[in-house]
Amino acid sequence: MSIHIIIDGYNLIRQSGFLGSLESRNIQAGRDALVEMLTAYRRVKHHNITVVFDGSSAPCDCPSRDHVQGVSIIFSRCGELADAVIKRMASREKEKAIVVSSDQDIIRHSAAFGCATLSSPVFEQKLMMASHLNSGEPDNDSEGGWIPTTRKKGPSKRLSKRMRQNQIKTDKL
């Protein structure tokens, strides 16, 4: 089963320090930087990725749908919020989707349809790790390797079934 990552574009940009600073200077620069990060992530992970932006601030010459190196870019229609598009996609994709947003309304709606959810800052960390892997730089932290231990790990209580399923899906990112 392939994973479809649905991203609330402006939410992710505005939750990020780096992307937010680019967007404050030029909104197009923020979008372009996000799409560039997503294409680098897709080269490493090969998941289906769709990023949804509000159409009210879309460039005039830009179509409502576009593909850049395997990343689908969708601008909502005039008068429609990106939240509505994301909710519609989440209700269609159900368990196959992971929705990336920090908007609680989107998170609740997506979880009700069985989608895994991930906050924007957590997904940004995953994007940064993928860009680090993609750059080919050696990792200095992995010198020691695995050290065996008898110390028990894990929570003392088991997570709910929904939380365990969400964790399994997000671990694949």
Image (spheres, grey):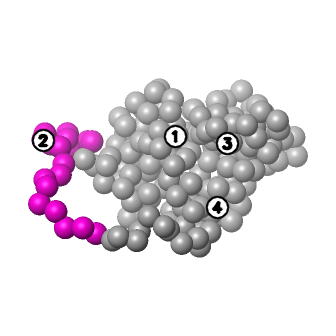
Q: Which mark is residue 42?
A: none
CA distance for labels 3 and 2 = 37 Å
Q: Answer with the quarter of the image where residue 19 lies.
A: top right
Rendered residue at 44%/42% (across/down): 118
The answer to which of marks 3 and 2 sits earlier in the sequence is 3
Residue identified by numbered label 3: 18
> Can you give x and y, in whole percent of width and height, for residue 136 in the image?
59, 73
> Can you give x and y, in whole percent of width and height, for residue 145 in the image?
33, 71
Residue identified by numbered label 4: 39
- Of residues 74 and 21, the one nearer the viewer is 21
The answer to which of marks 4 and 2 sits earlier in the sequence is 4
- Of residues 172 and 131, the one nearer the viewer is 131
Q: Answer with the quarter of the image where residue 79 lies.
A: top right
Residue extent of the magenta highlight: 146-163
Rendered residue at 50%/68% (across/down): 139
Q: Secondary structure at mark 4?
A: helix
The answer to which of marks 2 and 1 sits earlier in the sequence is 1
Q: Nearer the viewer, mark 1 or mark 4?
A: 1
Q: Which mark is residue 156?
A: 2
* Amino acid at pointer 2: Ser
Q: Is residue 150 magenta?
A: yes
On the question of residue 48 being in view, the answer is no
- Whether tag 2 and tag 1 are in contact, CB under 8 A, the answer is no
* Amino acid at pointer 3: Phe
Rendered residue at 41%/68% (across/down): 142
Q: Secondary structure at mark 2?
A: loop
Q: In the displayed structure, does residue 51 sit left or right of residue 118?
A: right
